[in-house]
C-alpha cells in the first residue's frame, strides 16, 4: 500500500498534548484526502449571506432584485475568491437563498464587508419589507478547521486550496475529525459562555460564545449512473434527510443550535444533484457525541457505508465535509427582519 499522508501538513504540526485516537497500525478501509493550502495562508473567511422570504406571487420582483444586488456585490471588487449558492425551505416555511463566499485574505473581506456586507443587513441597501436578510461569518485561522473528501473534486473552503492531498491516515474511525484539526493537537477546544443577542429595530446581532463549531457536510451524485443514483435516492438520502430534520427540529436538545439541509444551485439559480447540511454546534464534542452515538447519525453512517461497500471503487457518489471551531473574535452574526428561528438566533431563544 502507498504511504499515507498525515492530514495535518508539516508546517502546522506541533507536539501533541492531546493524544490522537488513530488505532495502532491503522489502515483506512478506503482512500480519502484533505485540502492543502499555501503555507502563507494563515486565516480564511467563510461568509453565509442569506435571503429569507415567504413564497408569494408579489414577492418575485423584490427577491430577484435582492439576489441580483448580492450577486453583483460578490462578483465585484474585493469579492470572494470562491463562491457557491444554495436554497432550502426552513422549519417555519420560509424559502431561503444562501450565497457562500470564501476569502483567503481577511483584509480583503473586511474591505468588501465595509462596502457591501454591512449594507446587506442594515436595511439601507434594499427595500422590500417582506424580505429577511442575514450574514453569518467565521474567520478561522488555518489551525481551526479541517476538511475531508472522498474524491478529487474540491468543494467549500477547498475552493481556496492549491490542491487536495494524497490518501490520508486519519479518517473512517471515531475521532478522526478531531485528529485532522491542527488546533486540537494541544487544545481540547472546550466551549465557554453563552450566545446573546442585541436588538436594534429589525436588526439583531448575536454575541458569540467561545469555540462555536460549524460543520458543512455534502453529497454529490451528479456523476452517478442510473442504478447508483436510484440506490442513493432510495436507500441513503431518506435516512440522511431524516437526520437533518431531527437536527433542525430537536437539535437544541443535544447542543446543535441550528441546522439547514440545502440544495446546491448552479450559476443560473437552478438546482443540481448536490446537497449539504450545515449546522451550528455549541462545541466540537457535542458534534462528536452525535456522530458517534446518536441513532440518527449511526443510521446515516451505516447507509453511506453500505452504499459504498456495495459499489466499491465503482461508486460515483462523492462525499465531503469541513468542520470549523472558531473563537468568539472570529465570529459575526447579524440578521435583519428574520424570524426568530433563523440560524444562530435559535441559540438565544428561551
Image (cartoon, rainbow, N blue to C red):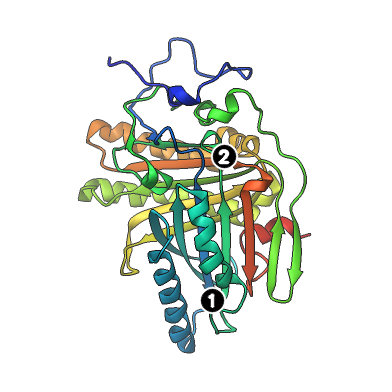
Residue located beneath label 1 in the image? 53
User: Dividing the image into 4 quarters, which one contains the C terminus?
Assistant: bottom right
Density class for disc 2 (Cα within 10 Å; few <14, some 14-19, many ≥20) is: few
Can you see residue 50? yes
User: Dividing the image into 4 quarters, which one contains the N terminus?
Assistant: top left
Question: Which mark is on residue 141?
Answer: none
Residue located beneath label 2 in the image? 295
Residue at horizontal 37 percent and vertical 21 percent from the top: 5
Question: Residue 316: which quarter of the image?
Answer: top left
* Viewer-proximal residue among 271 and 3: 3
* Viewer-proximal residue among 273 and 309: 273
Q: x%, y% of residue 116?
A: 51, 68
The kind of secondary structure element at disc 2 is helix
Q: x%, y% of residue 2?
A: 28, 16
Check the image and report above or below for 29 versus 246.
above
Q: Name the residue at the top extreme.
A: 25
Can you see residue 93? no
Residue at horizontal 44 percent and vertical 35 percent from the top: 40
Q: Is residue 199 left or right of residue 113?
A: right
Q: x%, y% of residue 129?
A: 59, 84
Distance from the alpha carbon under mark 2 to that under mark 1? 33 Å
Q: Nearer the viewer, mark 2 or mark 1?
A: 1
The kind of secondary structure element at disc 1 is strand
Check the image and report above or below for 17 versus 281.
above
Residue at horizontal 37 percent and vertical 47 percent from the top: 159
* Number of numbered callouts drawn: 2
Q: Is residue 61 left or right of residue 269?
A: right
Labels 2 and 1 touching (C-beta < 8 A): no
Check the image and report above or below for 154 versus 18.
below
Q: Is residue 224 left or right of residue 164?
A: left
Density class for disc 1 (Cα within 10 Å; few <14, some 14-19, many ≥20) is: many
Q: x%, y% of residue 312?
A: 27, 31
Amino acid at each position: 500500500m502507498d504511504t499515507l499522508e498525515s492530514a495535518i501538513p508539516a508546517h502546522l504540526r506541533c507536539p501533541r498534548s492531546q493524544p490522537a485516537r488513530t488505532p495502532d497500525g491503522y489502515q483506512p478501509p478506503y482512500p480519502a484526502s484533505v485540502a492543502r493550502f499555501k503555507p502563507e495562508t494563515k486565516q480564511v473567511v467563510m461568509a453565509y449571506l442569506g435571503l429569507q422570504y415567504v413564497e408569494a406571487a408579489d414577492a418575485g420582483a423584490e427577491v430577484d432584485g435582492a439576489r441580483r444586488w448580492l450577486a453583483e456585490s460578490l462578483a465585484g471588487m474585493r469579492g470572494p475568491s470562491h463562491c457557491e449558492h444554495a436554497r432550502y425551505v426552513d422549519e417555519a416555511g420560509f424559502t431561503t437563498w444562501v450565497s457562500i463566499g470564501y476569502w483567503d485574505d481577511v483584509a480583503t473581506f473586511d474591505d468588501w464587508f465595509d462596502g457591501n456586507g454591512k449594507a446587506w443587513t442594515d436595511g439601507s441597501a434594499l427595500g422590500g419589507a417582506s424580505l429577511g436578510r442575514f450574514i453569518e461569518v467565521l474567520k478561522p485561522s488555518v489551525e481551526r478547521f479541517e476538511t475531508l473528501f472522498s474524491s478529487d473534486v474540491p468543494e467549500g473552503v477547498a475552493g481556496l486550496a492549491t490542491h487536495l492531498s494524497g490518501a490520508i491516515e486519519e479518517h473512517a474511525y471515531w475521532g478522526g475529525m478531531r485528529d485532522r484539526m491542527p488546533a486540537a493537537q494541544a487544545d481540547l477546544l472546550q466551549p465557554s459562555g453563552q450566545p446573546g443577542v442585541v436588538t436594534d429595530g429589525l436588526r439583531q446581532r448575536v454575541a458569540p460564545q467561545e469555540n462555536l463549531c460549524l460543520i458543512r457536510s455534502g453529497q454529490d451524485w451528479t456523476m452517478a449512473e442510473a442504478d447508483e443514483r436510484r440506490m442513493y435516492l432510495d436507500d441513503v438520502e431518506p435516512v440522511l434527510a431524516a437526520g437533518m430534520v431531527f437536527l433542525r427540529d430537536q437539535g437544541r436538545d443535544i447542543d446543535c443550535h441550528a441546522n439547514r439541509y440545502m440544495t446546491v444551485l448552479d450559476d443560473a439559480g437552478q438546482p443540481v444533484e448536490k446537497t449539504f447540511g450545515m449546522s451550528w454546534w455549541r462545541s466540537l464534542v457535542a458534534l462528536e457525541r452525535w456522530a458517534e452515538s446518536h441513532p440518527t447519525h449511526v443510521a446515516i453512517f451505516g447507509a453511506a457505508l453500505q452504499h459504498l461497500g456495495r459499489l466499491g471503487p465503482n461508486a460515483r457518489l462523492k462525499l465531503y465535509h469541513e468542520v470549523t471551531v472558531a473563537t468568539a473574535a472570529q465570529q459575526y452574526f447579524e440578521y435583519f427582519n428574520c424570524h426568530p428561528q433563523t440560524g444562530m438566533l435559535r441559540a438565544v431563544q428561551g
